[in-house]
Image: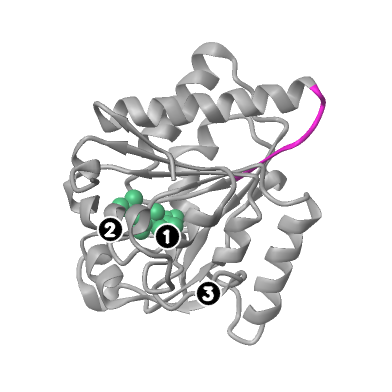
Amino acid sequence: MPADIFATAEKGAKWVAHEIANLIKEKAEKNDPCVLGLATGATPLGVYAELVRMHKEEGLSFKNVITFNLDEYYPMNNKSAQSYNYYMDDVLFNHIDIPRDQINVPDGEVSKEGIFNYCSEYEAKIDSFGGLDMQILGIGRTGHIGFNEPGSQLDSKTRLIMLDALTRRDAAKDFNGLNKVPKAAITMGVGTIFKAKRVILMAWGEGKAPIVKKALEEGQSDSVPASYLQRHSDVQFVLDVPSANELT
Ligand code: F6R
């Protein structure tokens, strides 16, 4: 699987932002929609900052962009500062010209009774656009992509999932304590991610080095869901030097 190693996370993030911008412009020239799969967390912050800069300083328009986010905690008040709905508005959507009705982030407030149908409809909506043109990903220390924790199958679809104990511990700082971290999330499946025409996974920092090695260089298995990406026809790992540290 191709891995591009950048001198710094900032340089890697800028490169990814420019790949996204080029795709948006290419699609706009043909009057086509550009369907992007987006991630949250610390990893893509530099990408969003650069996209906002390009919008403000270079006139990059997002009018033809349709977005689908990977995941949201469940249950979750969508307006809470810990929600991924809030995060996306805060770091990207409030600063660009994307029409609100072209934004899709899983709804943390959907009722328990309605969640099964909600997830099928999210999946069907992605399919109705012919799948994602590009999906960007971070990677969790459990090997999750989206919130597809160990045990997630290659053909898994958008669904409710229980979070791994390590994932909850990693999130505890954002929630002021482990007991406040939701136990579940709505996530696109590995199979949903696989429908993306192009996938870019980013990882920064030495904390990610062991899982990057497992995902890239060890066998494919549901114990490291990111390892399934080895089978995708257009996938790229974008790394900084510390996260690539353990690669052979
Ligand atoms: C977030 C997501 C997760 C994160 C992963 C890494 O939407 O899908 O898979 O990408 O947990 O999180 P950070 O970037 O905070 O290290």
Residue in view at x 60 percent, y 74 percent: 110
Q: Is residue 178 above or below residue 92?
A: below
* Disc sitting over residue 153 in the figure: 3
- The secondary structure type at the circle numbered 1 is helix
Packing grade of label 3 (10 A; few <14, some 14-19, many >=20) is some
Q: In which image quadrant can residue 61 be found? A: top right
Q: Which residues are magenta?
A: 30-36
Q: How is the image coloured?
A: one colour
- Residue type highlighted by circle 1: Ala
Instruction: Quickly name the residue at label 1.
Output: 226
- Residue type highlighted by circle 3: Gln
Pointers 3 and 1 in contact (C-beta within 8 Å): no
For residue 181, side relative to residue 241 (left or right): right
Q: In the rendered structure, which disc, 3 or 2, sits on the residue that comes first in sequence?
A: 3
Q: Is residue 160 above or below residue 86?
A: below
Packing grade of label 2 (10 A; few <14, some 14-19, many >=20) is many
Q: Is residue 66 above or below residue 74?
A: above
